Image (cartoon, rainbow, N blue to C red):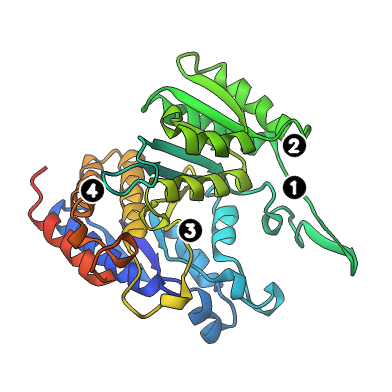
Amino acid sequence: MKILVLPGDGIGEEITRATMTVLNVVNNRFSLGLEFEFEDIGFKALDKTGTTLPDYVMEKAKQAEGIILGPISHLDYPPREHGGVNVSAAFRVKLDLYANIRPARSRAGLSRLGKQMDIVIMRECTEGFYSDRNMVAGTGEFMPTHDMALSVRKITAFACERIARRSFELARTRRFKVTAVHKANCMILTDGLFLREVRKVAEEFSDVELDEMIIDAMCAHLVRDPSRFDVVVATNLYGDILSDLASELSGSLGLAGSINAGDNLAAAQAQHGSAPDIAGQDRANPTSLILSSAMLLSWLAERYNNRKFSEAAAAIDRVIDNTLEDQSKRTADLGGPMGTQAFAEIVADELRQYSG
């Protein structure tokens, strides 16, 4: 089974190396049969090929069973016509990785609220307010004059229906509740269409409770009482903002696993950015990408009906939790002394001894 590994920019090489330290252990420990292939994207690819996302990398991504995607510095890329392709957006749209799945849960001694949280945010990520993925040619953002800028939000029934369906399916494996986040009081047509499709899907899942909440109220309630939420479904921008908020409340963005999943392919991707200010200093927390890779293993387990992968994913989750309980084993962002690779080695050593 081939996994394409793309370290990306900034701290990408460091946290990818740390993640591979862990994955190599579980690959052997659970006899997963994973084969890893590495390619450059981002600034390294731009220097070598003139683009941040060479065509051959996209072709390899299409042929892989899974992808590990490091953070990218697309805000700093040159314009698209000069090779600056947003790799995340290109993968999500061209590979149809429409569901950005972002769990957030509290851990002892790390939650910023001291309250119980265990939610999964299901973010539709191929359209919405993100203008770089809304047109077949050009972008949905333009300037009629020097003093006016416009942006087009695209919402389709097709995209809303399938992210809603994946959300209700997930809720059936958890606590049987879906919260649909919107701003239909102002964006009557676009968020109205989103709610219409969510409600239609909800009719097929009578055992799952549907709650609807306006985005600004959702932010307030997430801080006040995160325990009331289970699966949260949202369009692109709302899901992006909410997932960062939820992850930080649960402890840190550095703990936030994330995958971009389609029906036939998925990519593990840390929820945080490339942090170029600490790149090369062995200070980055690799937990997010490690947990994202564990999520990829879980997705592969379901896709290929292979229990070994789910066992390996569960082992990583449990060992990460146990490791984080000890402050002396945490990275600097969590008040500990460990560097990026040292933390990964601790996790890897624990996995070698893991007995379930």
Q: Is residue 1 above or below residue 80?
A: above
What residue sits right under mark 2 in the picture?
190
Mark sitting on residue 321: 4
Question: Please, which residue is most extreme toward the bottom here?
Answer: 47
Residue 334 figure quarter: bottom left
What residue sits right under mark 1 in the picture?
153
Residue 40 in sight here: no
Question: Please, which residue is most extreme toward the top here?
Answer: 206
Q: Nearer the viewer, residue 342 or 79?
A: 342
Q: Amino acid at mark 4?
A: Asp
Tell me the SS state at disc 1. loop
Sequence-wise, the earlier of marks 4 and 1 is 1
Q: Nearer the viewer, residue 63 or 161?
A: 161
Q: CA distance from mark 4 to mark 1?
A: 39 Å
Name the side, left or right, on which 351 lies relative to 254. Answer: left
Crowding at dot 1, Cα within 10 Å, few <14 / some 14-19 / many 20+, comes out as some
Q: CA distance from mark 4 to mark 3?
A: 33 Å
Closest to the camera, between mark 4 and mark 1, is 4
Q: Where does residue 325 sit, x and y in percent of width and height?
A: 20, 50
Is the Cβ of the residue at disc 1 closer than 8 Å to that at disc 2?
A: yes
